[in-house]
Image: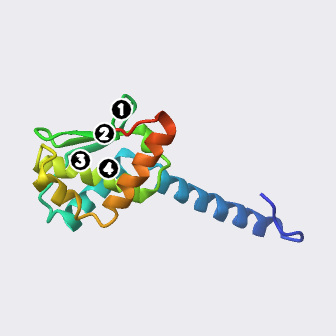
Amino acid sequence: MLLPAGLSSTDEEQWVRRMLDRLKAKEQRRRPSDDDLLERARDLALRYLSDKASPTSVRWADNQRHRWGSCTPDHGTIRLSTRLRGMPAWVVDYVIMHELAHLIVPNHGPRFWALVERYPKAERARGFLEGFSMAANGSVEEC
């Protein structure tokens, strides 16, 4: 970290601490914890699904190599691939929204997609993930 010359040691400490706090906050937004994910899921359910989806847990999963996310409607659990970590928040939110819709409609029928499309950036996020998948493995991955 570069600092302006002539700062007192107290000012230098305050500046470094402030920058580290900013970096930590930015990293937390990019790599949310499981508790953060559950909070985001509940917020998305409230905003876009009239609070009809009630996830009991949302957590990162290392074993999701071919899907971005999955859920178990009977238990209300959602798992997100750790490959999503570091992607834009609106992309992670789209995958959460997709899985929340599965808590209401377990298949990929028209009713399911109508729920997913309530998320304003659904089409954009889907395109982002398709492009990412094609660049990484030459094929499009499933939810």
Confirm or deny contact between disc 1 and disc 2 (CB under 8 A).
yes
Confirm or deny contact between disc 2 and disc 3 (CB under 8 A).
no
Between residue 83 and residue 12, name the one nearer to us. Answer: 83
Three-letter amino acid code at disc 3?
Glu
Q: Quadrant of the C terminus?
A: top left
Q: Residues within 10 Å of mark 2 (few under 14, many from 20)?
A: few
Q: Quadrant of the N terminus?
A: bottom right
Give the number of the mark in front: 1 or 4.
1
Of marks 1 and 4, which one's residue comes earlier in the chain? 1
Picture coordinates of residue 102 (x, y %)?
A: 17, 47
Question: Is 83 on the left or on the right of 5, as rendered?
Answer: left
Q: CA distance from mark 4 to mark 2?
A: 11 Å
Give the number of the mark in front: 2 or 3.
2
Q: CA distance from mark 1 to mark 3?
A: 15 Å
Does 33 sit above or below residue 14? above
Q: Residues within 10 Å of mark 3 (few under 14, many from 20)?
A: many
Q: CA distance from mark 1 to mark 2?
A: 7 Å
Disc ID at residue 66: 1
How many numbered dots are placed on residues in this image?
4
Q: Secondary structure at mark 3?
A: helix
Confirm or deny contact between disc 1 and disc 3 (CB under 8 A).
no
Of marks 2 and 3, which one's residue comes earlier in the chain? 3
The residue at which mark 2 appears reads as 142
Which residue does the image show at 40% across and 31% down from the upper left?
A: 62
Does 135 sit above or below residue 118? above
Q: CA distance from mark 3 to mark 4?
A: 6 Å
Of marks 4 and 2, which one's residue comes earlier in the chain? 4
Give the number of the mark in front: 4 or 2.
2
Disc ID at residue 99: 3
Give the number of the mark in front: 1 or 3.
1
The residue at which mark 4 appears reads as 95
